[in-house]
């Protein structure tokens, strides 16, 4: 793209000066051409980083006058200005889309979406860490796992990994980006199936686990039994 902001020589013919040596008058002047903002291709487009790393997003814009750069996240106000956005120690909560916006008052502002994926070891929570149920009724254990990359989830009882059989049924579901739920159904629970169960999740960055105790009650427990 040519740079039109430079000095030009203008020559104007004046008939009244015809008898002079030259009928032209010339002068140097600077021609400034306004141009809407645009974002250069060498700006950041996407990043995959590990939690705790220092992250730097770059956004370079052209146009005339020189555009100003603003940063924001979706549905959030502007939170930073300048070509470089620095995140000293990124957290999993920082993942998602960022927008760099360039504006110079000429035409419309322009923007670029920059996607950040943050990898982190599993984090496990449980709605209940103690579940009671009567003999010969189904008990449901649930754990919630947040991790990136996607983790492997397993249930363990008395040191042995559980698989689907006549006593157990495991179902996993994805609830959101980087989030999964795992439900262990203990079918028609008997005395020898009470005790501590472990929900474990692992990926290449680490592992986490949580214990859920299952104990015997005299009466069947809700909410799952009540929904049958």
Image: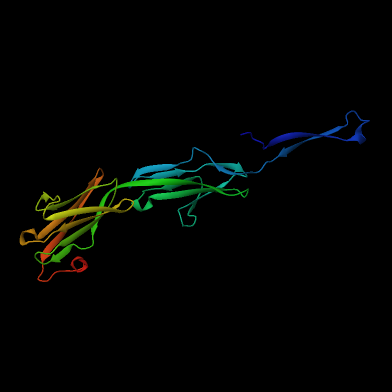
Given residues 121 and 165, the one toward you in this image is: 165
Rendered view: 88 above or below 196: above
The residue sitting at the front extreme is 228
* Residue located 37% across and 46% down the image: 117
Residue 48, percent from left and from top = 36, 42
The residue sitting at the right extreme is 19
Point out the image quarter for the N terminus: top right
Given residues 172 and 225, the one toward you in this image is: 225
Given residues 49 and 176, the one toward you in this image is: 176
Residue 71, percent from left and from top = 49, 50
Rendered view: 3 above or below 65: above
Point out the image quarter for the C terminus: bottom left
Q: Is residue 4 left or right of residue 206?
A: right
* Residue located 14% across and 56% down the image: 197
Rendered view: 30 above or below 91: above
* Residue located 40% across and 45% down the image: 55
* Residue located 52% across and 41% down the image: 60
| Residue 222 quadrant | bottom left
Residue 226, percent from left and from top = 20, 69
Q: Is residue 11 left or right of residue 120?
A: right
Q: Is residue 155 left or right of residue 179?
A: left
């Amino acid at each position: 793209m040519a740079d039109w902001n430079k000095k030009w020589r203008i020559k104007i013919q004046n008939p009244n000066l015809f008898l002079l040596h030259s009928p032209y008058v010339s002068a140097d002047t600077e021609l400034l051409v306004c141009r809407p903002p645009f974002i250069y291709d060498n700006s950041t487009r996407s990043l995959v980083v590990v939690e705790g790393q220092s992250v730097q997003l770059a956004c370079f814009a052209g146009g005339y006058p020189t555009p100003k750069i603003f940063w924001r996240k979706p549905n959030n106000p502007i939170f930073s200005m300048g070509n470089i956005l620095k995140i000293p120690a990124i957290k999993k909560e920082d993942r998602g889309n960022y927008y760099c916006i360039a504006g110079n008052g000429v035409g419309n502002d322009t923007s670029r979406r920059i996607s950040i994926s943050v990898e982190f070891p599993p984090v496990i929570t449980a709605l209940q860490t103690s579940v009671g149920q009567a003999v010969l009724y189904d008990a449901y254990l649930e754990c919630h796992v947040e991790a990136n990359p996607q983790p492997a989830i397993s249930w363990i009882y008395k040191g042995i990994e559980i698989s689907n059989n006549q006593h157990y049924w495991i179902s996993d579901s994805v609830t959101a980006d980087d989030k999964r739920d795992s439900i262990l159904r203990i079918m028609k629970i008997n005395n020898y199936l009470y005790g501590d169960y472990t929900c474990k999740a692992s990926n290449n960055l680490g592992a986490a686990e949580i214990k859920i105790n299952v104990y015997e009650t005299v009466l069947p427990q809700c909410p799952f039994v009540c929904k049958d």
